Amino acid sequence: MARPQNHQELPACYAMVHPGLEEVAAEEIRAELGGDVKRAEDGFVVFRLREIDRGILQLRTTEDVYLHAWGTDKLSYRATDLESIRRWTDKDADWPALLKIHHAVTPKPKGKPTFHLVVQMTGVHGYRRIDARNALAQGLAGKIPASWRLVEENAALEFWLSIHGATAICGLRLSDRTMRQRAYKVEHFPASLRPTMAAAMVRLADLKPHHVLLDPMCGAGTILAEAHQYARQHERPQVPWRLTLLGGDIDPHHVRAAKANLHHLPELPLRTWDARRLPLEDTSVDRIVCNLPFGKQLSSPEEIGPLYYDAIPEMDRVLRPRGKAVLLVAEAQALKAAIHPVGWKQERFLPVRVLGQRAVIMVYRKP
Ligand SMILES: C[S@@+](CC[C@H](N)C(=O)[O-])C[C@H]1O[C@@H](n2cnc3c(N)ncnc32)[C@H](O)[C@@H]1O
């Protein structure tokens, strides 16, 4: 564990998040790590921690986390940026300190260390991505021991430079792909949710230990798996969690996929059902967290409105008063129209993108 005496000595960290989830990720970083969030926008959250240890790798709503080397909002879009990138990389970052913390969080594999340079670039710039990568490599000259090998994949160390418009951020990647790809997810299908998005929806539900959580259109069960994980993370000897999970789907293949992904919870009742006629008692659930089908996933977008008009009153019937619903939809207007008659109050509205499509996470409270 890296533990310098003074927290000012620690570098900042940053997380890359699914666009639209910046605020939820910032809330997770504050709540779970006690982080001091400096900035949360454009797919990045920059924050400071009192200690940087493996706890940072337990974040559930972030795609990747990094040690911050340098950052700017003042790229000129001109080729002169290349000299700035080289200079900032050379002069502005304390690479020995960053490497030491990286090794403490992610132990060095045996054998000759390997490294990799990754440059992401969006926006129209007067230089190419390869030029920015060369500038990064020039700035790093002499910072990386000569014995280390540059490789194209599976490197022990990844130096990242992300350029988005006038903003650039450079750092050392701490996480690997296991941060965003969960080990439980053995079954996938095209409309299946990203685990980080499901984790964000679960956080927005504000779960309590005794709650009953329902996903009436559970697909491959990602939301239920993340809710179970959330409960496990928050379990304390003095606060045992007794979260009850309920889920089902109209498609038996999806129910089978959910059973495979939730095989670690064999007692969980997953059923083939129609969310418009749920086999559940009135006011019997505290939270509904659900990713409803998008227009594109049904045979025509016109089917979405009627599905929402039938499914929402049924969700209202089973949701207890003051209960919350967190719903991810592509057709926000159709959802609002279906919610209007049941009188739920909108608490949050988070625009996101799902598989390149505009979507929104809506949080509602039943009166
Ligand atoms: C977008 S997917 C859900 C994906 C899921 N969150 C996951 O991570 O895999 C929507 C799901 O709604 C299901 N569905 C559609 N109409 C339904 C209905 N009337 N009752 C129950 N499930 C339904 C579909 O079969 C599909 O699995």
Image (cartoon, rainbow, N blue to C red):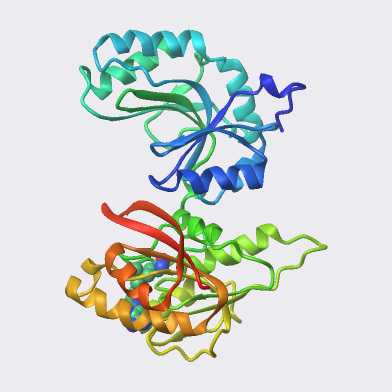
Of all residues, the one furthest to the right in this rendering is 238
- Can I make out residue 118 in this image? yes
Q: Residue at x 42, y 11 (%)?
A: 139
Q: Nearer the viewer, residue 13 or 366?
A: 366
Q: Image check: 147 left or right of 240?
A: left
- Can I make out residue 253 in this image? no
The answer to whether residue 107 is above or below residue 138 is below
x and y, in percent, of residue 349 in the image: 41, 55
Q: Residue at x 73, y 23 (%)?
A: 4
Q: Image check: 110 left or right of 18?
A: right
Q: Residue at x 66, y 57 (%)?
A: 233
Q: Image check: 33 left or right of 299?
A: right
Hey, which quadrant is residue 354 in on the image?
bottom left
**How many numbered callouts?**
0
x and y, in percent, of residue 234 in the image: 69, 58
The answer to whether residue 292 is above or below residue 152 is below
Which quarter holds ligand 1? bottom left
Hey, which quadrant is residue 266 in on the image?
bottom right
x and y, in percent, of residue 74 in the image: 36, 17
Q: Residue at x 37, y 84 (%)?
A: 252
